[in-house]
Amino acid sequence: MRSFTYSLITCAIIAGTAQAQEKQTHKDESDIETLVVTASPLNRSVLESATPVSIIAGEDLKQRLAPTLGETLKNVPGVHSTYFGPVSSSPIIRGLDGPRIKVVQNGLDVSDASRVGPDHIVSAEASNATQIEVLRGPATLLYGSGAIGGVVNIVDNRLPTQKREGVDGQVAYLHDSVSSEDTFSFNVDGGTGDFAWHLDAYDRKTENYDIPGPAEADSDEDTGELENSFIDANGFTGGLGWVQDDFRAAVSFGKLESDYGIPGHSHGHDDEHGHDDEHDEDEHEGEEEHHDEDEHEEEEIFGRLKQDRYQAMVDFLKIDSFINELHFHTAYTDYTHAEIEEGEVGTVFDNETFEARLWGKHEEVAGWTGVLGFNLVDTDFSALGEEAFSPATQTETRAIFLLEEKRSGDFLWQLGARLEDTEIKPDNSFFEHDEDEHEEEEHEGEEHEEHEEHEIEFDTQSYTSLSLSAGVVWSLSDKSSLAFNYARSERAPTSAEIFSNGLHIATGTFEVGAGFEIELEGDEVEIVQSGNSVREEVSNNLDLTYRYVGEDVEAHFSIFFNQIDDYLFQQNTGLYMEDDHGHDDEDHDDEHEDEHEGEEHDEHEGEEEGLPIFLFTQQDAEIYGFEAEIDWHINENLRLDTYADVTRAELNDGSNVPRIPPLRIGAELHWEADNWHAELGATYYAKQDNIADFETETDSYTLVNAAFNYYTNIGDAEWVLFVKGNNLTDKLARVHSSFLKDDAPLPGRSIVVGTRINF
């Protein structure tokens, strides 16, 4: 299979010089020259962007759809997935994820908890999107320091901005055999005169998904399925708009609810957990039968997400002044994620976010046009419960930004700057609770000792970040261009990266923020507040991109080099925290260790190791690699789409950055004639042996997929029938970048059938 994939790649490269008939656009393609990057207020096309951009839209997007955003985008060049089982997955862009990748909806932050941990789902539904834009590399100028690694913009019609007469939309249904998934969705847009409206909804239910071998990497037991990997999610959005030639205004409201398993973790707790009683009745009302745990000896843990999101926008167009356009976009998000254990609410994460962005376009000055804007974000985050690992925090961000461009002959110059001020205010009572437990558990029955040295008191953390970029797009001909971009970006650390201090139950780790230090006394571990401040990351990123768009061949090649000072990452310390969270009455009675004490790993047979301690630490790092994609129309019926990417990430001490995706090569052969479309593809993932300390290697694997679509008309509506086969060889495969690599392999062979009706 590997040689087959290489052969397809070779054929595609040779095709760059081949002659073919005039290109025929297939149903799952989009015209790259007309795709507009809405994530940029300059509204440039992909070909006019100095930074690498991919846009997935139309039938191509529908073919890629998966229950999670990370899995939907995982075959975009340069993009991989965190893969926390099938239930939660976020995009990894060029080896960077979490707080370095900004996920936005219509340009505004989705404002969930997915940047805090890989077990939290991205609360934006791709099934109702019109297109998804992936900006690879720093996009901090418009989106702030959280976009130091890239941006994923999910674009939908929830804010109607186009005039419509009548009604149009889409209804879709699919069933996936690997998890008994049933997903239903619809989008409807309508309007009359200046008035426009939008409505969408979806419902998704899955059972545990099938796997082709043992769930645990060191086990020989073929479990047949991955326990606790179900999804039960639904949501809807409604929007209203008023659209005129020189004025647009729109508002929307969206609601999302999801219950989903947390794979790899089961517990047999009694009911002695502390929890917020006011949540109990509310959170468990109407619980689905498949969540009942009576048949299981151990108690599964699952997440329950609820989100309400309000968005609004006002655009003033064709203003007769120096500022000829003025745009104001805002969103308020109320997000709650609860971890349910044994029918009780364990830990509850709340996130309330208000964001507003105001920008104006100005008239040409010495050939330069651009936008000047202001951005503010206020976030109130809290985690309540016995297993909360980070204190409640209030984060306020204020920023001004400037984006300018000028066309000079064959060159399009692009400059930008952003000045951002961030304040993070922690609730120190979180640490006082830990100190009280320390006193009760460690010194019960003993004379009270002075413990000033254990007091934890963090001041408000303040950061001022300056980001700059300069790029140029050189039109070599009417078919090709060369783009260069340099970005110097600064990123303020997040509250979790600074203040974490506790068990993160979903990842099975004990997380310690960079605001702490680990001290060893013999074989005991003590976690104390650090006297050193947590510094901003400073990234210097270079991108070089070549694009070719011909009649029969489209090609895109990018190389990048990113040097990051004070790179902040989770390092496996090789130490273990004794698990003081009992799993039955006997364990609770035997609790005697403080949350802030651990033991070094002892290899004695049968000895319980406890939870590995992951410490946020800072080192300089270098991240570099390339992405390539070639789409060759062999003739009017056949086309070959190939891609490859690789990322290397090294720390300044010569060691490797953990959880970096391996080299990947993929190819898909498409056939289309009349109302028929079929494709056969294979993606090869190389062995990953460039690993960090305490990390294990991941074997190579190849995934084979196929799809078949039939298009027909019923009156004025287009009807699409489709069938897809994923992992057709039933390969046991593990994702190196996943925290659950050794507990949750990829799904086995699946057959997906469904239909879409466009009217």
Image (spheres, helix red, strand yellow):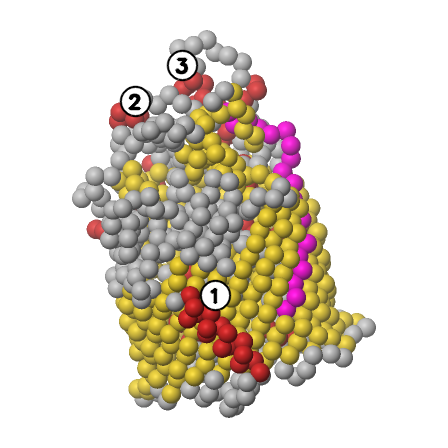
Q: Quadrant of the N terminus?
A: bottom left
Whether residue 535 is in magenta: the answer is yes
- Please identify the dominant SS of the magenta region: strand
- What x and y, as percent, mark residue 249? 55, 69
- What x and y, as percent, mark residue 634? 47, 84
Figure quadrant of residue 534: top right
Range shown magenta? 526-545
Q: CA distance from mark 3 to mark 1?
A: 60 Å
> Which of 75/429 is in front?
75
- What x and y, as percent, mark residue 233? 33, 57
Classify 505 as above or below 483.
above
Q: Residues within 10 Å of mark 1 (few under 14, many from 20)?
A: many
Which residue is at 37% across, 81% downward? 677
Q: CA distance from mark 2 to mark 1?
A: 53 Å
From the image, tell me which residue sits under label 3: 444
From the image, tell me which residue sits under label 2: 589
Q: Residues within 10 Å of mark 2 (few under 14, many from 20)?
A: few
First reached walking from the N terminus: tag 2 or tag 3? 3
Front: mark 3 or 1: 1
Which residue is at 68% across, 64% downward? 485
